[in-house]
Image (cartoon, rainbow, N blue to C red):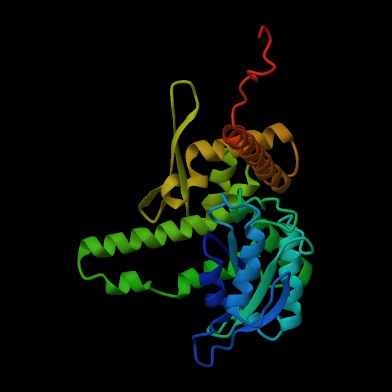
Amino acid sequence: MIGKVKVNQSFGAMCRYVLQEQALGNGAEVLAAHGVRTDSAAHMAADFDAVRAMRPNLGKAVLHVALAFPVEEKEKVTNEVMGRIAQDYLKGLKIDPENTQWAVVRHQDKTHPHMHLVVNRVDLDGQTVSDQFIRSRSVDVCKGIEQAYGLIVADQVGRQQAREIGPTPKQQQATTPKEEQSAEWSRARQEIGRALSYTAGQARSFDELREALRPRGIELELTRRKDGSPAGVVFAQDGHRVKGSQVGREYSAGNLETGFAKARELGQDPVQQWQQLGQDYALAKLAAEYAQAKQRQAQQQPSRQPSRDFGIGD
């Protein structure tokens, strides 16, 4: 099971996409929902936006997750099973399915079974649902669901498919040596990103991450400053070198070191360490939002001058 996570701005565009209203014979099927109408994209988006209004300054309130399964699981992953998995996925991310708006829609446009989960990042109490480290947390949740439901391990399938699928569309379209090199680098970056999504959350140091990546054919090169702090990290695969920040900002040397240091400090299970780090960031973000709201409120209040009728000394 693979979860592709994105955070977007428009519920209107997202609801139209998942319900596929404009596509003839689209095969989109609503499996389950909570707190929103499912008879049309317009109604669904309006319900999402009504709750989103409690946090008007939250720009990206749309959490969209595409949950996909290997084609071999087609008979096993029924609509009912998908609906249960979607709610277990939310619980795994610490999102209360009873106190949050969400909808899950199955699409039939691919050979492998997959569904789209749309979630409001403003819950029914008006609190913001954290998106900190959500991609690495999603990987951990998917692994847990694979175990709980006896599903094929997607990481193994992904590596096998990467060896079998042949050239990517960008590689096929390349006509010059420069274009070919660029396409091959892009593919290496994607494969490195996939590997990091399965390994970064399990490591407590760069050495541990290096050892976890080597069996996947990926080397880790780290440079440090004079004070010993990490200056930069590069991942290498088949002669292609990719900076951590080019894979994703969460994989820059500084952000990785922050995660490792917090994990070592907490001394918990590696998965719990990264989840705790995400919660800490969410609390800090919430505190900052509260302070900003109080500041705006103070600025909006009219200043009060001493009354000339009752002023002292008159």
Residue that sits furthest to the top in the current view: 313
Q: Is residue 68 visible?
A: no
Answer above or below: position of 173 versus 224. Answer: below
The residue at the point 65 percent across, 45 percent down is 278
The image shows residue 102 at horizontal and vertical percentages of 69, 68
Quadrant occupied by the N terminus? bottom right
Q: Position of residue 147 (x, y in %)?
A: 75, 66
Q: Is residue 134 visible?
A: yes
Q: Residue at x 47, y 70 (%)?
A: 163
Residue projecting furthest to the left = 176
Instruction: Give residue 7's position: percent from left, percent from top.
Output: 55, 59
Q: Is residue 57 left or right of residue 34?
A: left
Instruction: Choose top left, top right, bottom left or bottom right for residue 256.
Output: top right
Q: What is the number of callouts on the image?
A: 0
80 sits left or right of 41 in the view: right
The residue drawn where x is 52% and y is 60% is 9
Q: Is residue 176 above or below residue 214?
A: below
In the image, 80 versus 163, the foreground residue is 80
Q: Classify the position of the C terminus by image quarter.
A: top right
Residue 37 placement (x, y as % from top left): 69, 76
The relative height of residue 5 versus residue 196 in the rendered view (above or below) is below
Which is more toward the observer, 256 or 209?
A: 256
**Which residue is nearer to you in this view: 149 or 245?**
245
**Residue 85 occupies which quadrant of the picture?**
bottom right
Residue ID at (61%, 32%): 298
